[in-house]
Image (cartoon, grey):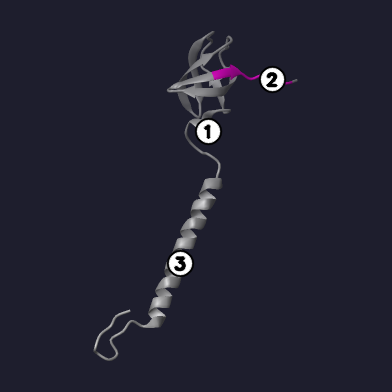
Amino acid sequence: LMETDVEGYAVSMHLVITVAVVAAALFSATVLLAVRQRKRPIVSGREEMIGAMAEALESFSESGQVRAHGEIWSARASQPVALGQSLRIRNVDGLTLEVEPVREEK
């Protein structure tokens, strides 16, 4: 790697190989962790809210308040909602949830 007139002044090939192997292993581990992370399910954000359940905190016909994930949200519904009714989140528009009543199967 270096040219010099002094004898014995060189980089050990064992050192070069060791550093290259360690760098390749670290790079491979980083790529593997990144690929695994992309396969994990979404745990926060807008995408995670859609399809989740909410509970009506008041009766309302167009807009009111609901509890979702332990937080109180403003909500809009296309049909009347009763106090305590279970709702499914269809969309998130800013700080407002678009919800629909859950149909209970018998």
Name the residue located 55 percent from the left edge and 21 percent from the top edge.
55
Measuring from the top left, give residue 4's x and y in whole percent: 25, 85
Give whichever of 5, 70 is nearer the camera: 5
> Which amino acid does the dot numbered 1 rest on?
Glu
Marks 2, 3: nearer the viewer:
3
The reply to whether the C-beta atoms of the residues labelled 2 and 3 are less than 8 Å apart is no
The disc, 3 or 1, on the residue closer to the chain's N-terminal end is: 3
Quarter of the view holding residue 19:
bottom left
Q: Which mark is residue 24?
A: 3
Q: Are marks 2 and 1 in contact (CB under 8 Å)?
A: no
Query: What amino acid is at disc 2?
Result: Glu
Crowding at dot 1, Cα within 10 Å, few <14 / some 14-19 / many 20+, comes out as few
Q: Earlier in the sequence, mark 2 or mark 3?
A: 3
Residues at circles 3 and 1 in contact by the CB criterion of under 8 Å: no
The magenta region covers: 99-105
Q: Is residue 103 magenta?
A: yes
Q: Secondary structure at mark 3?
A: helix
Task: Identify the residue at image location x=45%, y=62%.
Answer: 27
Mark 2 to mark 3 CA distance (whole Å): 56 Å
| Quarter location, residue 1 | bottom left
Which numbered marker is on residue 48?
Answer: 1
Dot 1: element: helix
Q: Is residue 104 left or right of residue 62?
A: right
The local crowd at label 2, few if under 14, some if 14 to 19, many if 20 or more residues have their Cα within 10 Å, is: few
How many angstroms separate mark 2 from mark 1 (CA)?
A: 23 Å
Question: Of 93 and 60, which appears nearest the observer?
Answer: 93
Q: Amino acid at mark 3?
A: Ala
Q: Secondary structure at mark 2?
A: loop
Q: Which residue is mark 2?
A: 104
Q: Provide residue 98's location: percent of width, then percent of height.
A: 52, 19
Could you say which is closer to the camera, residue 99 or residue 22? 22
